Amino acid sequence: MSELSEFLQHLANGLVLGFLYALVGIGLSMVYGILRMINFAHGEILMVGVFLALPVSALGAPAWVVLLAGIAGATIMGLIVQWTIYRPLLKSPEVTLLVASLGVSLLLQNLVLMLTSPQPKRPDPAPFLDQPFHLGEIVLRNVDLAIVVIAMAAMLVTHLFLKQTRHGRALRALAQDMSAARMMGVHVPFLVMICFVIGSALAGVAGVLIGYKYGHLTPLSGFLPGLKGFVAAVIGGIGSFPGAVVGGIILGLLETFLVGYLPDALAQYRDAYVFLVLILVLLVRPSGLFGKPESVKV
Amino acid sequence: MSAVASHVQSVATGPTARPATAAEPVLELDQVSINFGGVRALENLSLTLGAGEIRGLIGPNGSGKSTAFNVISGIYRPRSGEIRMAGHSVVGLRPDQIASRGVARTFQTLRLFQAMSVVENVMLGTHLGARAPSPVSILLGLPASRRFEREAHERSMAVLEALQIADYAQETAGNLPYGVQKRVDLARSLVANPSLLLLDEPAAGLTGAESHQLMELIRKLHAERAFTLLLVEHDMQFVSDLCPRITVIDFGKLLVEGTPEEVRQNGDVVAAYLGTGELSAGAKAGGLASKAAATQAPVLEVKDLDVRYGAVPALRSVSLNVASGSITAIIGANGAGKTTLLSTVSGVVAAHKGQILYQGADVTRLSCEQRVTQGIVMCPEGRRLFPDMTVHENLLLGAYNVIDQAAIRAALERVYALFPRIANRQRQQAGTLSGGEQQMVAIGRALMAEPTLLLLDEPSLGLAPNLVELIFETIAEIRKLGCSIMLVEQNAAMALEVADFGYVLETGKVTLAAPAHELKARSDVIEAYLG
Amino acid sequence: MSQATGATLAAVGVFALAVWAAQAQLNPFYLQILGLLGINIMATVSLNFAAGFGGMFSLGHPAFMAIGGYTAAILTYPVAMKSMRIPGYPDWLLQLQLPFLPALLIGGLAASAIAILVGWPVLRLRGHYLAVATLGLTVIVQAAIVNLVDYTRGALGLSGIPGLTNLWWIAAFLVLTIFIVYRLVHSRFGRALRAVRDDYVAAQMSGVHVARTRLIGFTIAAFFAGIAGGLLGHLLRILTPGQFSFSAVFLGVAMMILGGMGSITGSILGAVIMTILPQFIIPLERGGNILGIDVPALNGLTQIVTALILIGVMLVKPAGLAGAKEFSWRPLFGLSRPSKRSGAA
């Protein structure tokens, strides 16, 4: 394999990974933009979504049905969590919400652990998705292609929702000036719920796609994607929709290239690099690529 | 008390006690400018304070007083210009470095350390005092550290005694009444024994007797310690009584500097506070339309309204009516409770007592959103646009609860017809518009909700005179669309030109209520502003 | 000596007596639980120093414990076994075996050094970026332990650490930690730290160097976490990466939150409850016949209870059991508050 094609291969792999991070990052970014809350349970919503889709897959349903089941599962789980735990805390200090989300994260991980067998799981193989896909010298699988296409479609739908519908506009307004939005008649709790629905649905998409790409699902499978999604959102500028997308892709590429080009001994630390990147970004440009610096209010 | 205060001084040591020489001004602002997102907050402001001077800094709402304080204390860095303290430039220094040069300040909004006790709050003021004991001494509780703590505690208690709040020393600061918290803030700045003291609205929220007490206290302390004092205060009486010289700023620029008497007599100052301007004959009220309006049933009745922020009363049994189809102006000095009144009517702020009747129905307990759907729409002070969204999107948000697409299109056309200038800028981001254009979008956005009662909060704030006239003529136009308007305005002259009826608010109470043209002729309106 | 100081000294005496009795009478199982309890209290008090008093919500405490623990363990590890089990170190280190106390202190300092490295960029930011960045530190340290097999024995765990600690060591360091944290919180530095937590602008205007104050506070907290880690390794005689995983993060936060942020008393309460409670749950996790009822294996039940407590506290009593209050002798002796004027006299 030539150096160029190796580079292109990493590029393709990084893009695929980046789209997954972006899907996770959008939900985190939107919630942070409105509530200033880091939702540590976001990754667990993803994980619950895919675990709820597993039985559907076991029944022999086609992959797209499994995907819908995963979206539905994650959305319902996200709604339940938001309604029962976050909603009563809407006016609490940020740290209360953060701790509550830590609790939810731990709760969901261990509930799933208790209710399922300890072996890692995967959706029933979909032969079509596992077939290789050649693009010049680059070898991908159909599932990688599906990730890119589905992620782009999901982002497009979200983008159109935010730009073209009244609730979408209201969501963006809420992130910019909550009290002015209220003066326009926007009902804040309802929109916060919408925000969680969108974030959870996108996490569900990411969850099922991760399941098909990597297999090996455990109750801990959501944790790192959740954290990395947040890092992606910070890189792009937290609270910004395009920021989360671009941040996710940058993070995916960085991770892939670092792992690809570093010697093996160093390549093992792929998770560590992500957080080194976070610390670097916070050091150099704390408001991210698309974010605005937070001003001091006196 | 003087014995206590001199005791305070004798204990004080360290960098804060450095006296300024008579030759060097304690504080010198030289052509200082700063912008916020395209808005000039300060423009070439110059100001010189001699040692031991007491200077008042006044100006209408939004004129840049607090910004000046924030620039002096290092929270904001000026875009251009020079700030010198005792002859040395302090531009670019951190706030704590500036504090270490003997500057202390209080804050307009309370910024106490909420979870700490009162005496601990004040002890923070001694942070820069005597040299701190070594870590070992602290950990082992050696005599040096005990003495340090005892002295800091004694100094703090002495100031608390002087301010007559020593009884609260052990209470948690955040739980105390507003007036006490104000004093704790003052104590925290005094205990540092500053050479330059910046007080930001120390009398805000205090009753007449309290603010008189405070003034006596400041005088006494100044006589004993000879610090230099810069004071921002909207209570003109307070400033006039305390300060031999007053600096007036408007639009971030120096307007006048002089004795209180000179300032009060100055036409520019009266104009800055009360506003001026001529409206076209069509826009002026008092025609047939307004006479007819006066006989209409009121669209809004406010009865015995009390509003409090925590323990601070903001409105005290306010009652007023807005006649259907009329423009009702609420005027009064900064801090009189005008914005609170509008916010309570719109539902952003909750009423403590009293009733708000809208078209005969009680809406006191309805949420802000519910009131919007019923036709009470607020256009908030300072525009409050969604800066990252386009003009078009901002307007559409105004129509959030309107489902009928045809109605939205019609409303859009109405707004663009009313404000042709923003019609050309539909796709531009609202944050990049000029102040006047932003105000147009803000009013337009409120109109998109098809209000029956429009609440306009300070629509002319920070706008150049020609734009002010344009905005007020548009307000008259809006009334013709059949919408009642409740108008809060600092520019009393203009507001009374356009309004049918006016109320004057002073410290949370309605002190005058009369048809607008009668109010306009009365001199006591000026007194409500300038004392 | 005031009545309260006397009472405190008496309490320390009673505590020492209790430690002596426990060490003499209890079987090793209970001794270990008591030892763990002491270490947990230390860790929680130090976390609270950063988060509750300093407003720096750190999720990296297990990482600091791991650094302190592994450093101390490597320094006390028997020379004979070193070159076999952890051969990656340079010769001088392989030949080195330090006594327990210096090893422990060096472990604490190592944790502090890392805290400065991470804290310097991140502590300048407001908001809760710190939480994510420090959770990242936990991830990084865990990855390092797992992968640096020649230095840590990786996922196998570093076993064979000499059992140099006992209840006396732990009790002594516990009392020392609580004493130092208490003194610091009520010193000029502690006031500045709490002031920055409450309102950093006002603190700056009082002359507090915000970034430096926060960094020092964070570093001190990491030091005590490192010491706690060192004690842990020498109590259990084994260190594994799993001990410093996400569940350790959660457990620490749960202890602090349950007790109350900004209260040392609360941290002690929280750590006691969250250390003792699992001892009753662990039998349930294994399943089997308990009190005549067949219980299936309930994996993760301890964590579920921890999580529910965490969520419940946030919903019902977000300030925790003790709020921000501290234990005081005064109500017990019927003493009133010190008179408002006594301080100025």
Image: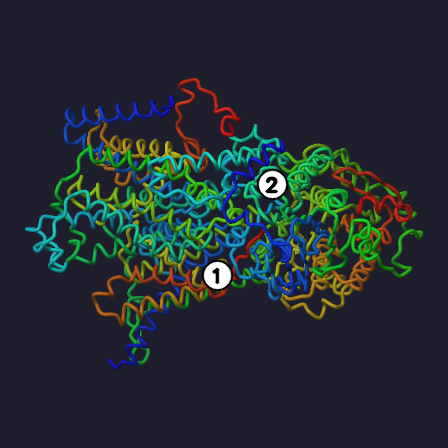
Query: For the residues carrying marks 2 and 1, which lies nearer the camera in this image?
Result: 2
- Indicate the position of residue B128 as horizontal and vertical percent values: 49, 46
Residue name at image x 53 percent, y 26 percent: C341
Name the residue beneath numbered marker 2. B186
Residue name at image x 28 percent, y 33 percent: C175
Name the residue beneath numbered marker 1. A287
Q: Is mark 1 on a helix, strand or loop?
A: loop
Residue name at image x 64 percent, y 69 percent: B427
Q: Which chain is home to disc 1? A: A
Q: How does the figure colour the protein chain or chains?
A: rainbow
Check the picture and name the quadrant holding the N terminus of chain B.
top right
| Amino acid tagged 1 | Ser
Q: Marks 2 and 1: same chain?
A: no
B319 or B521: which is nearer to us? B521
Residue name at image x 15 percent, y 54 percent: C153
Q: What element carries label 2?
A: helix
- Indicate the position of residue C53 as horizontal and vertical percent values: 42, 41
Q: Which chain is home to disc 2? A: B
Classify B299 as above or below B252: above
Q: Quick check: B182 left or right of C116?
A: right
| Amino acid tagged 2 | Leu
A233 or B360: which is nearer to us? A233
Question: Is residue B307 at all visible to an observer of this figure?
Answer: no
Question: Is residue B185 at all visible to an observer of this figure?
Answer: yes
Q: Quadrant of residue C280?
A: top left
